[in-house]
Amino acid sequence: MHRPFIPGLGLAAVLVTAALASCGGDEDGVPPTPDGGSVVDSGNPPADSGTPDAGDDAGTGDAGADDAGTDAGTPDDAGTPDAGLPDGTVPIPNALSGFGLFTGTPATGGLKPVEGNIPYALTTPLFSDYSVKSRTLYIPPDAQARYSASDVLDLPVGTVITKTFAFPADLREPEEDVRVIETRVLVRQPGGWEAFPYFWNEAQTEATLANGGRVVRDVRFIGEDGVERTLDYLVPSKNQCQKCHHVQDAQENQVLVPIGVKARYLNQDQDYGDGPVNQLQHLADLGRLTGLPPVDQVPREPNAFNPEEATLERRARAYLDINCAHCHNPKGTAGTTSRLFLNVDNTDEFTLGVCKRPGSAGGGVGGEFDIVPGDHSTSILWYRLHTEESGKMMPELGRALRHDQGSQLIADWIDAMPARACK
Amino acid sequence: MHPLSLSRAPRAVLLALVGLLALPACSDDGDDRPDAGQPDSGTRPDAGAGDAGGDAGTSDDGGTEGDGGTVAWPQDFSCEGKEQTTLTFNPGQEQELQDAVNDLAECTTIELGAGTFQFDNAITIRANGITIQGAGKGTQGEATGGEASTVLDFSNAAANTNGLDVVSKLFTVSDLAVWNAKKDGMRIESSSNVNIQRVRTEWAAENLESNGKYGIYPVKSTYVLVEDCEAYNAADAGIYVGQTQHTIVRRNVAKKNVAGIEIENTKFAHVSHNVAQDNTTGLVVFDLPGNPIRGTDVYIAHNTITGNNRPNFASVEASSSTVSQVPAGTGTFILASRRVELEHNTWGDNNTVDIAILSGLAIESDPIQWAAGFFNYPSQDIFIHDNTFTGGSGRMVDNGTPDPERRPLGALVGAVYQYGAAAHGVTGVEHVLWDGIDPAPRDESLANPINICFTRNTLPEGTQASVVDFDLQAVGGHLAAGPTPENVAAAWGETRRYAQDAEPYNCAGFTPALTLR
């Protein structure tokens, strides 16, 4: 059960992706990525590939390459986006349309991925102020991603990941009266990942590069619970993307990486038009993914809010993993400072927060310990994700509102732990 | 951290420590041997700070104050020989500035015109060799920039954002004010060769728990200079240097914060000529439990730390923060710190005590929590000499409003000294209070096992004792048994007072001397 790419859009436009497997060498749209293949063989998983200059050279030189937009108006026949410069560098256009990844606009009834720009969804997505998010993955036709059981997929140079954030007026009717706010774009450049925010105009006809970020005041919507909510929505600046999308490399430089594109979150079905098919299998069938084991051997994180999929603990851990572990892991800045590791493969109860005092939590965070088994109300971990108070809430960026469902899930999980006093 | 758990700090925990003490004995002392006599200053060569180094040359032997400051810190990034550009922005161009900041080439200077900039988001810098230069920091209370001041106003910024948020090698920010940031005024993290000069961070309202936590906050960095800055109304620390190696903090003013200036888990800190007044606590040197950097070699000279009696507004509920536990009126708070030298400073009119020296176990009694820093809870080697104590301190512990839940140390000290005044005519807490926990468990045969030296200080006329060994563990034990007159008397009986020239606090400091650069 996944929402269509952008509310209001059928899947018809996506059907053509099925053809891609058999026409990878589409003569009209072959992107000039001569060394794209070699990168696939580089043997460096993106998460720790060490490209130490990724942060330094972000945005230099290629930011103003307007020529990428030349094919923007004719995406249907372009087939694939222009993959750019001879070394595989993807030019960063000033308008989202310049990537050639979509046809249509929200104003005309739907923003539709072109063939080869593959929609996907996560078993448990990261919460962002209840925004409705739509994701696509574009891998250059002559390149392939490589499967990883635990890390982010090893995605080749030229890969473009998009995530579009929208607010329907009423979440109970997510396809009606939708306001699309931003599309975030992650690009795998030769030097590493780069992130760019694109901000949609009021007319919903174009999104333009907004490196400085934007604040959208008074976004209003009615939640699934029927309650109206209002928030000032923050489109993060380009540099703020790094605050979540990072790990520290061996030299303690911050290196940007994607978050959700992991096998365990992609491991579910989606209907691309011919009935449900596993998303990873779909990528492999399209020739975009190598090394995929039989799908029944691929790890999977459950939908955190479907009790039929997994135990309360598994679902809570999945929620913490996708929402918190990009910082709270042994290689993340917040993780190393706080020693709170919420990555799903952390089996150490203490660094998970049980009866652990924070290093420096600041004032008024509801308790002494990150997790007090049996008592969510005095657990800082819960408080941080429950509060809406600036300076105390977590994650640092990306939410102004409480996620009621998530807060309840973590409360239930902590309360279900055998009660014991911490000291 | 949790409230002081005196009643809960069982002997068993301390006995358990005996086994653990073998571990810290082989920790990282070895690689930190100071080379004595090293001049301390060191501004980076291309900082362009004309006045840097003026007072820097104090040698650590307490001698003359020279003008040494020419020793350069190493740099792991340089703009030499690289293209350097300057971008200029004026009020009204906030969005242009934000877009530019997020697309910066390295070695760019950003000039900010005079006036008030209204930001709706943090200014986030992720590039090396960046300089941000305003027209002036203005004066306390100035929410809008004038003709010669630049105010960055974050009053209407998105929730949960900082003012300046920086990761950069070779970063300089100067001559501006950061007003009403949502979180920290200026957070500079994982950076090196950082110069923060003539900056003011301020929140409009006094005593507001919802004010930002830290004003000026360089953390996890190396080679950090904070000078000629001002910090007001932070709900935690005005100037907070955390987890940093090599820092100079000088000629700053910190007022109306919970903590004026904090030096946390930091090695090689030179803190001089600062004014810390009207905070809850003026100057704090401490290690946090669970932090892998072991703070050491902190030099504190020529500072004025007086009248820090602001009620603690760090938190109104159960809290995990350290400073929320500090009783109002604490001039200087030294916790889980080692190799700290204090000379030519002035203390006075601090209601609780001028200087408190505490073991980390007083705040966090579980030694396992200290494992990351090789069990760095002890305070050790605190050399206090040639300072001036002007008096008026220690007369009203925690401003006379003790709170056993939130600020147990104050409640305990207050109760004991109330008895001391009534029964023994002791008029106040002495200038230096030592908790007597280290080493744990306490060896009663050692009077000064952690080498606190207190000599050659100028004391108020008629001063009798100036150092008190409070024996927190024993005092807490008596009072935990109930606040009966007998128990309070017994608690008082555990405390010991020493005059300035009395053994064993009349020692000659420590060797080798501090390493500061």
Image (cartoon, coloured by chain):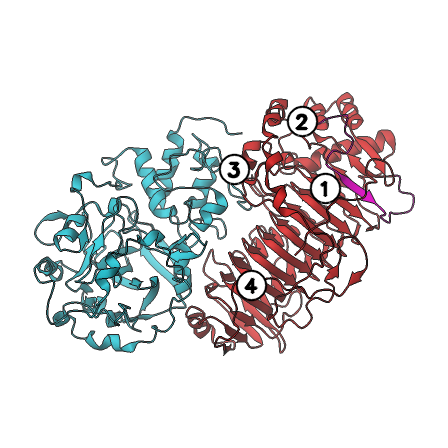
Three-letter code, disc 2? Pro
Q: Secondary structure at mark 4?
A: loop
A159 or A216: nearer the viewer: A159
In the image, taking residue B239 as reference, residue A375 lies left or right, namely: left
According to the rendering, which colour does chain B have? red
Q: Secondary structure at mark 3?
A: loop
Task: Tell if the residue under mark 3 belongs to the same chain as the one under mark 4.
Answer: no
Please give the residue where the numbered disc 2 appears in the rendered image: B441
The outermost residue toward the right is B462
Three-letter code, disc 1? Asp
Q: CA gap, disc 4 to disc 1?
A: 31 Å
Read off the magenta span. B442-464
Query: Which chain has been coloured cyan in this picture?
Result: A
Task: Tell if the residue under mark 2 belongs to the same chain as the one under mark 1.
Answer: yes
Are the residues tagged 2 and 3 within 8 Å (C-beta)?
Answer: no
Give above or below for B70 relative to B352: below
